[in-house]
Image: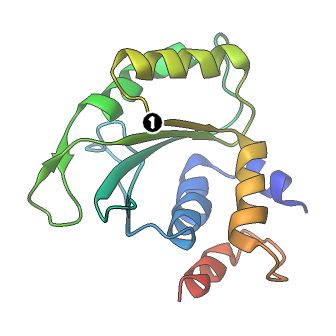
């Protein structure tokens, strides 16, 4: 089964735990944590990386299963409260477990397609909250990152069953 088909069939939890978090680690994040749950404050995954000056950039990932549209079952407008919470609510840094921080970058990832109206809605919503660093990834973007940035020319054949192990070994 190809990468896209494997990703599309995953639950939101499996997408987060078996793909997104290992992928972020393999891409070089300094710290990655699962924030999903009753106290997540709109953030499914937290990660940090260092910029060119050695400063931490605090980021969150908002993950949804399936296609996202402006209208219908997965209406982006129904997610506005959680997105606002992700952007606006500060939290204790997982790096030192004491400093109150806010996110510097917001990533919206889904396992389906995101139509133009939904993309525009997310962008407009984030900009109104003074969040200029927005990344929106649909399933095609996710497949491209996995194949070109994570797997690269390693010879590894993508499989949900062992992708987490592949990413862990790549980071060594």
The residue that mark 1 highlights is: 133
Identify whether 145 is placed above or below 150: above
Q: Check the image and name the residue furthest to the top.
A: 71
As rendered, which of 121 and 73 lies closer to the eye? 121
Rendered residue at 20%/56% (across/down): 93
Q: Position of residue 6 (x, y in %)?
A: 79, 57
The image position of residue 68, as x and y in percent, is 66, 25
Q: Nearer the viewer, residue 79 or 142?
A: 142
Q: Of all residues shown, which one is farthest toward the left?
A: 98
SS at circle 1: loop
Q: Residue at horizontal 54%, vertical 82%?
A: 171
Q: How many marks?
A: 1
Q: Quadrant of residue 118?
A: top right
The answer to which image quadrant residue 112 occupies is: top right
Relative to 98, does residue 159 appear above or below in the rendering? below
Residue shown at the point (82%, 52%) measured from the top left: 4
Q: Within 10 Å of the Cα at label 1, are there few (<14), some (14-19), or many (20+) other Cα atoms? A: some
- Front residue of 30/114: it is 30
x, y (%) of residue 45? 42, 52
């Amino acid at each position: 089964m190809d990468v896209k088909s494997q990703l599309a069939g995953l639950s939101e939890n499996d997408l987060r735990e078996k793909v997104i978090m290992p992928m972020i680690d393999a891409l070089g994040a300094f710290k990655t944590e699962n924030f999903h749950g009753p106290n997540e404050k709109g953030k499914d995954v937290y990660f940090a990386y260092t910029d060119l000056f050695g400063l931490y950039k605090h980021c969150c990932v908002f993950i949804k299963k399936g296609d996202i549209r402006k209208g219908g079952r997965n209406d982006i407008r129904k997610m506005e409260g959680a997105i606002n919470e992700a952007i606006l609510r500060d939290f204790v840094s997982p790096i030192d477990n004491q400093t109150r921080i806010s996110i510097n970058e917001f990533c919206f990832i889904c396992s389906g397609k995101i139509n133009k109206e939904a993309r525009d809605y997310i962008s407009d919503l984030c900009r109104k909250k003074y969040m200029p660093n927005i990344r929106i990834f649909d399933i095609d973007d996710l497949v491209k990152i996995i194949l070109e940035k994570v797997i690269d020319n390693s010879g590894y054949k993508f499989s949900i069953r062992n992708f987490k192990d592949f990413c862990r070994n790549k980071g060594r």
